[in-house]
Image (cartoon, rainbow, N blue to C red):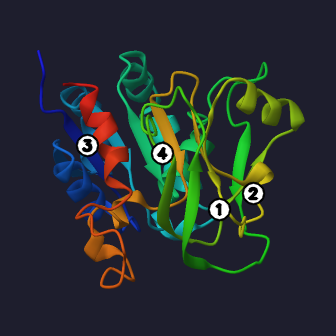
Amino acid sequence: MPIVPRVLVLRAAGVNCDLETARAFELAGAHSERIHLNRILETPSLLDEFQIFALSGGFSYGDDISAGKILALQLGHQLGDALREFVSKKKPILGICNGFQVLIKTGLLPGPIAGRTGQSATLTHNTSGQFLDRWLTFQARSKKCLWTKGLEQLELPIAHAEGRFIPTDDSVRQALWNNDQIALTYATENPTGSTDAIAGVCDSSGLILGLMPHPERFVTRYQHYAWTSRSVRSEEGDGLNLFRNAVRLFQ
């Protein structure tokens, strides 16, 4: 029977895109709730009440040590069992920008690969050494990824200083391509210097996605910097279908 999925959008110190992420899921047909990490640490069983888990962008804990590292340690050490159970039930997880960094550093992305478990890639400083805040075009690559299903190119904004994706070694890089786990690549330029222009990856199931661009910042045309002069007058932004794809899983 179709249901309206409930989405848990995580709040934590330094996270600042949770409102936009929650709104994007609502526009896509889900019911979203922003819940602080401390509540989940107190009651890990709260995760059982939701069908989708989202880690939004920002600078969790000021990105001290490295981007997303402290939040990743909290999730891994204090919520590891609850998250593994969530994953085992084949429930989708989304990590946007800082959320992607967190998922990489927990080892949930890309997951077991090339004979490795744990962290097998990182997101580090852009080769420019600068914070990048721009609109770019992205190519959807993976056929197995739930979130990018049916999508081709997306125009989305980026806003990060540590977005350069680097796998541990070439065996991981090759396995990501061979396993169809490259979800997004930079289509026309690679300003971060990411290996193979990778901008997003999924796990082997296709249910967990992490990406550096911000789809929640382009779900209506009015969020586009040139909305008054765009030749295509669709009321929707390119990012909305990414959220819809997850909602459709339950319909």
239 horizontally vs 212: left or right: left
47 horizontally vs 192: left or right: left
Residue 36, relative to residue 94: is it above or below? below
Closest to the observer, 196 or 89: 196
> Marks 4/2: CA distance?
27 Å
Closest to the observer, 123 or 234: 234
Closest to the observer, 122 or 38: 122
Residue 27, relative to residue 65: is it above or below? above
Residue at image location 51% in from the left, 60% down from the top: 213
> Marks 3/1: CA distance?
24 Å
Quadrant in which the C terminus is drawn: top left
> Marks 2/1: CA distance?
7 Å
The answer to whether the residue labelled 3 contacts the one labelled 1, judged by CB atoms less than 8 Å apart, is no
Q: Of label 2 and label 1, which has the lower sequence position?
A: 1
Q: To which residue does mark 3 refer?
A: 8
Q: Of label 1 and label 4, which has the lower sequence position?
A: 4
Q: Position of residue 119 (x, y in %)?
A: 69, 37
Q: To which residue does mark 4 refer?
A: 74
Q: To which residue does mark 2 refer?
A: 194
Q: To which residue does mark 1 refer?
A: 163
> Marks 2/3: CA distance?
29 Å
- Amino acid on which the number 2 mark rests in the picture: Ser
Q: Position of residue 14 (x, y in %)?
A: 41, 68
- Amino acid on which the number 3 mark rests in the picture: Leu
Closer to us: mark 3 or mark 1?
1
